[in-house]
Image (cartoon, rainbow, N blue to C red):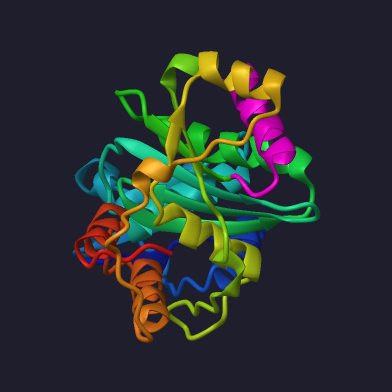
């Protein structure tokens, strides 16, 4: 069951920034009138400021429904928390999957939280990749008692770019905690996928979504260095099923699955299972 979003604030600056971001993310919300008590609304998250919480009488009773913002907090991280509670629910999270389509000009990035689609981005500067990844990790690890499992699935169309991004990950994060998978990204750019509002998502993000649905070759810090030194291209022919079937309806099936992922109706693992059961290779 999806969570409804409510805003309860008299802070005009907070409201302006919040409204702008929620509108950009196409997240609908309702505005609540200020009273002495915060309403206890089922399946809801109420957005307010930390400063204003002292004005309410019943904060302790409804604290599991409140997501407060303090001026010292990174606002982009706060928005990630809002997205997570809206799409995945109010709980401790276990893991993130980042699917990446590295291009010469743009980088498509799709993020899954606990196996469900969370958000996507087109990055016009690859140097912003680590910064964007860290925003999600820091936001969702913030009050989480257990370390998040981190998986990165990279398209390997341009190995020099892909390896550079992987190298950055190994430098910036604890390499033992990273799962890195290289995926064949051929023909990923041909799919036109629409979100739940029927709006076509950018082609780099669509490609990253298709990459996330493919199996690949897992690499470690040790064999990554070998790949980098020898400038080799990894082939994962063992994942190719020679009995796989191709039919005229496949593209429609794949687009249907991708769009159900964006709606939150299908998890990543279930989607991959469907494709594998049908013996599709794409």
Please provide percent x and percent y for residue 185: 56, 55
Q: Residue at x 57, y 22 (%)?
A: 224
The vertical placement of 61 against 94, above or below, is below
Q: Quadrant of the N terminus?
A: bottom left
Please provide percent x and percent y for residue 4: 32, 68
Q: Single out the residue that lies furthest toward the front.
A: 242
Please provide percent x and percent y for residue 176: 44, 15
Please provide percent x and percent y for residue 96: 40, 40
Q: Which residue is drawn at 38% across and 66% down?
A: 5
Do we see residue 68 in this rendering?
A: yes
The answer to whether residue 147 is left or right of residue 183 is left
Examine the image and state in which quarter residue 25 appears: bottom right
Check residue 159 for magenta coloring.
yes
The vertical placement of 236 against 214, above or below, is above
The answer to whether residue 175 is left or right of residue 228 is left
- Camera-nearest residue between 168 and 190: 190
The vertical placement of 245 against 82, above or below, is below
Q: Which residue is drawn at 41% across and 53% down?
A: 214
Our reading of the magenta stretch's main secondary structure is: helix
Q: Quadrant of the C terminus?
A: bottom left
Do we see residue 73 in this rendering?
A: no
- Camera-nearest residue between 170 and 29: 170
- Camera-nearest residue between 77 and 120: 120
**Magenta segment, which residues?**
156-173
Examine the image and state in which quarter residue 213 appears: bottom left
Check residue 274 for magenta coloring.
no
Tally of marks = 0
- Camera-nearest residue between 131 and 163: 163
């Amino acid at each position: 069951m999806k969570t409804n979003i409510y805003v309860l604030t008299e802070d005009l600056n907070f409201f302006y920034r919040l409204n702008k971001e929620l509108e950009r993310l196409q997240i609908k919300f309702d505005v609540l009138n200020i009273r002495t008590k915060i309403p206890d609304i089922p399946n809801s998250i109420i957005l307010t400021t930390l400063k204003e919480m002292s004005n309410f009488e019943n904060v302790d009773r409804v604290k599991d429904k409140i997501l407060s913002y303090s001026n010292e907090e990174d606002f982009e991280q706060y928005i990630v928390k809002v997205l997570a509670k809206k799409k995945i629910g109010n709980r401790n999270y276990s893991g993130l999957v980042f699917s990446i389509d590295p291009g010469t000009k743009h980088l498509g990035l799709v993020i899954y939280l606990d196996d469900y689609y969370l958000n996507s981005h087109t990055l016009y500067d690859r140097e912003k990749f680590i910064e964007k990844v860290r925003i999600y990790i820091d936001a969702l690890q913030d009050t989480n008692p257990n370390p998040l499992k981190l998986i990165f699935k990279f398209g390997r169309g341009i190995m020099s770019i892909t390896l550079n991004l992987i190298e950055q990950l190994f430098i910036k994060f604890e390499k033992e905690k990273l799962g890195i998978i290289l995926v064949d990204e051929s023909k990923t750019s041909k799919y036109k996928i629409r979100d739940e509002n029927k709006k076509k998502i950018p082609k780099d993000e669509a490609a990253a979504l298709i990459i996330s649905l493919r199996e690949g070759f897992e690499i470690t810090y040790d064999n990554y260095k070998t790949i980098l030194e020898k400038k080799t291209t990894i082939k994962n022919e063992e994942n190719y099923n020679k009995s796989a079937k191709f039919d005229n309806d496949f593209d429609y099936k794949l687009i249907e699955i991708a769009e159900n992922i964006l709606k939150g109706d299908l998890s990543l693992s279930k989607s991959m299972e469907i494709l594998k059961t049908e013996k599709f290779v794409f």
